[in-house]
Image: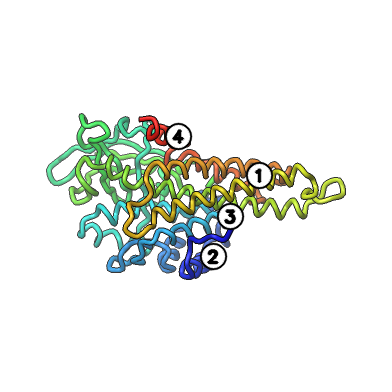
């Protein structure tokens, strides 16, 4: 079915993204995978191309366009190119809304121009070794010392952790407040006592730097409180629907691309004197995956429409959870089945299906695991 989601402007933007990938990313990506990190220059190149801060107002150096469909195009094209290491989606769609909606005018002047130019790479530090997704278990704390906070604690699995110049840290500012005693503090590169640990060795997305962060008596100015004091829980919940939708968008794009690659492969690959595509089992596998992708695509596009409807409330948490759960689990199944259809070649890292198998495995985990998505959905129906 022809998609109804985009206008000619979106498709023109898609061509811009493809040109950027071909020129600035793909020629260097194998080296970044070996290095375990992308170059800072590619972030600046993305800024020059207008790919950063799409929704940030022009006054602060952004694109001035809040239409989330442009972010959807970015996610689709980066997924199809097999280049998840450059975490522009994290920067634009997850951290960006915190800065645009919660920052004071003074903070916007300080941070947003660099955010949009690629000079300031961002990260959000929520996960801790003993807390995972449980906000109430966060132990990183910030003590009030008049004109500044003293921050102590550690975080792990932080995407952009090595490159980040601005880190939005979730910290306990009211010890007895539980999840409602948390605040968002922005820690800047070079702050005394702020140290980065290992660039963690993952099974996939090798070029996406993921780090441990340590805070030892870090002095954070009061001017770096983002949003309301003790308001982090509400702030985090407000932005989760978009984060989960963005993951779902990448997931269905990944599944569709794998299906395209595998369809081409089984037409060309011969076994026992004839193409694999002549085997009924292979045709049934392709038919099942194509149908599942088509159904999922329809639902995810509908969620994007809901999220971008002018004057609307945006996508609700339940449907965002449905999209995230279903699309990421589909991506995982499709990656496994497509790898199987590639046979031994599917196990070779030089084949895109092998890289997609490992790169995409995180999708059912970050942004809230599949199990948490089901809990959110079930609770809404059975409360």
Q: Is residue 257 left or right of residue 269?
A: left
Query: SS for tag 2?
Result: helix
Query: SS for tag 1?
Result: helix
Residue 72 vertical position relative to residue 225 in the rendered view, above or below: below
Separation (CA) of disc 2 from disc 1: 29 Å
Q: Does the CB distance between marks 2 and 1 fall below 8 Å?
A: no
Separation (CA) of disc 1 from disc 3: 33 Å
Disc 4 versus disc 2: nearer the observer: 4
Dot 3 corresponds to which residue?
30
Residue 371, image x and y in percent? 46, 33
The quadrant of the rendering that contains the C terminus is: top left
Toward the right, the furthest residue is: 273
Separation (CA) of disc 4 from disc 3: 37 Å
- Mark 1 Cα-neighbour bin, 10 Å: few <14, some 14–19, many ≥20: few
Dot 2 corresponds to which residue?
18
Disc 2 versus disc 1: nearer the observer: 1
- Earlier sequence position, callout 3 versus callout 2: 2
Residue 306, image x and y in percent? 40, 53
Separation (CA) of disc 3 from disc 2: 18 Å
- Earlier sequence position, callout 4 versus callout 2: 2
């Amino acid at each position: 079915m022809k998609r109804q989601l985009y206008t000619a402007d979106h498709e023109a933007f898609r061509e811009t993204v493809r040109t950027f990938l071909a020129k600035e990313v793909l020629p260097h990506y194998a080296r970044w995978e070996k290095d375990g990190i992308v170059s800072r220059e590619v972030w600046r190149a993305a800024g020059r191309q207008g790919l950063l801060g799409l929704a940030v107002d022009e006054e602060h150096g952004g694109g001035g366009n809040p239409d989330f469909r442009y972010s959807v195009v970015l996610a689709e094209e980066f997924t199809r190119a097999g280049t998840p290491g450059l975490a522009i989606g994290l920067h634009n769609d997850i951290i960006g809304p915190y800065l645009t909606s919660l920052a004071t005018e003074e903070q916007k002047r300080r941070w947003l121009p660099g955010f949009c130019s690629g000079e300031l790479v961002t990260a959000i530090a929520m996960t801790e070794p003993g807390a995972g997704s449980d906000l109430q278990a966060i132990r990183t704390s910030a003590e009030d010392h008049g004109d500044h906070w003293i921050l102590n604690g550690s975080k792990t699995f932080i995407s952009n952790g090595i490159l980040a110049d601005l880190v939005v840290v979730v910290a306990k500012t009211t010890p007895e407040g539980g999840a409602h005693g948390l605040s968002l503090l922005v820690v800047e590169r070079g702050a005394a006592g702020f140290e980065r640990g290992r660039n963690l060795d993952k099974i996939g997305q090798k070029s996406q730097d993921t780090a441990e962060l340590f805070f030892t008596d870090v002095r954070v100015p009061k001017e770096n409180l983002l949003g309301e004091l003790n308001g982090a829980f509400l702030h985090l919940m407000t932005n989760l629907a978009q984060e989960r939708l963005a993951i779902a968008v990448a997931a269905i794009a990944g599944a569709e691309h794998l299906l395209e690659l595998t369809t081409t492969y089984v037409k060309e690959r011969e076994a026992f004197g004839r193409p694999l595509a002549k085997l009924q089992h292979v045709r049934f596998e392709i038919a099942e995956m194509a149908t599942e992708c088509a159904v999922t695509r329809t639902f995810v596009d509908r969620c994007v429409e809901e999220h971008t409807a002018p004057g609307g409330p945006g996508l609700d948490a339940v449907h965002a959870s449905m999209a995230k759960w279903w699309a990421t689990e589909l991506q995982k199944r499709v990656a496994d089945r497509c790898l199987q259809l590639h046979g031994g070649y599917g196990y070779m890292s030089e084949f895109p299906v092998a890289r997609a198998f490992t790169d995409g495995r995180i999708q059912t985990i970050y942004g809230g695991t599949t199990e948490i998505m089901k809990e959110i959905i079930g609770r809404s129906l059975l409360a």
